[in-house]
Image: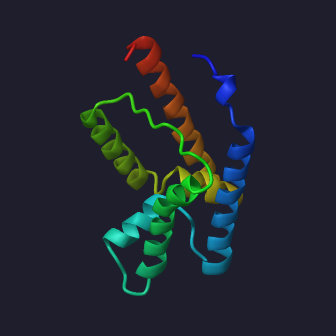
Amino acid sequence: MSIAWNVFTPWSALSGGIMIGAAAAMLILLNGKVAGISGILAGILKPLTSDSAWRFTFIVGLMAAPLIYSLFAPLPLLQIDASVGRLLLAGLLVGIGTRYGSGCTSGHGVCGLSRLSLRSLVATLTFMGFGFITVFVTRHLLAI
């Protein structure tokens, strides 16, 4: 593995992280809701009448963000080195994992850690650890 230092973008990564943190902080401070994407999406799929509007708005904002970004800078090239079947399997496994883990990386990693939640720390370490293991096994042991 090598890092392409000519496309390393620490300032845009930092600004993106600040915006994610600010959005998560605003959502919990102003609305009392955690910015966990799996929970927000699950609330749309199984809606409560008084709870749907902010969830829908949040998801629309996630989808609109790249379009707004493209007005100011070119979008990065998208390259996915996996088959459709592998992507569907990965999405299914992530969905199952978020149900068993009571949330996703955004809910636990961004919001839970900022609230000093021990459960979120364990969940985030588990997500990251298994991600590292998966990459190592698929790239180095199986050479996929």
Toward the bottom, the furthest residue is: 50
Q: Which residue corresponds to the image point at 39% horizontal and 71% vertical from the top-left?
A: 43
Work out whether 90 lies above or below 16.
Answer: above
x and y, in percent, of residue 31 in the image: 60, 79
Does residue 116 show up?
no
Give whichever of 134, 67 is nearer the camera. 67
Work out whether 91 lies above or below 113.
Answer: above
Q: Quadrant of the N terminus?
A: top right
Q: Which residue corresponds to the image point at 44% horizontal and 59% vertical from the top-left?
A: 38
The answer to which quarter of the image holds residue 20 is bottom right
Work out whether 5 lies above or below 24.
Answer: above
Work out whether 97 lies above or below 20.
Answer: above
Give whichever of 14, 76 is nearer the camera. 76
Does residue 47 show up?
yes
x and y, in percent, of residue 14 in the image: 73, 47
Toward the left, the furthest residue is: 85
Q: Quadrant of the C terminus?
A: top left
Tell me the colour scheme of the image.
rainbow
Give whichever of 21, 105 is nearer the camera. 21
Q: Which residue corresponds to the image point at 50% horizontal and 69% vertical from the top-left?
A: 58
- In the picture provided, is 73 more to the left or to the right than 116? left
x and y, in percent, of residue 21 in the image: 68, 59
x and y, in percent, of residue 85 in the image: 24, 35
- In the picture provided, is 144 more to the left or to the right than 119? left
Q: Which residue corresponds to the image point at 55% horizontal and 33% vertical from the top-left?
A: 129
How many callouts does the rendering have? 0
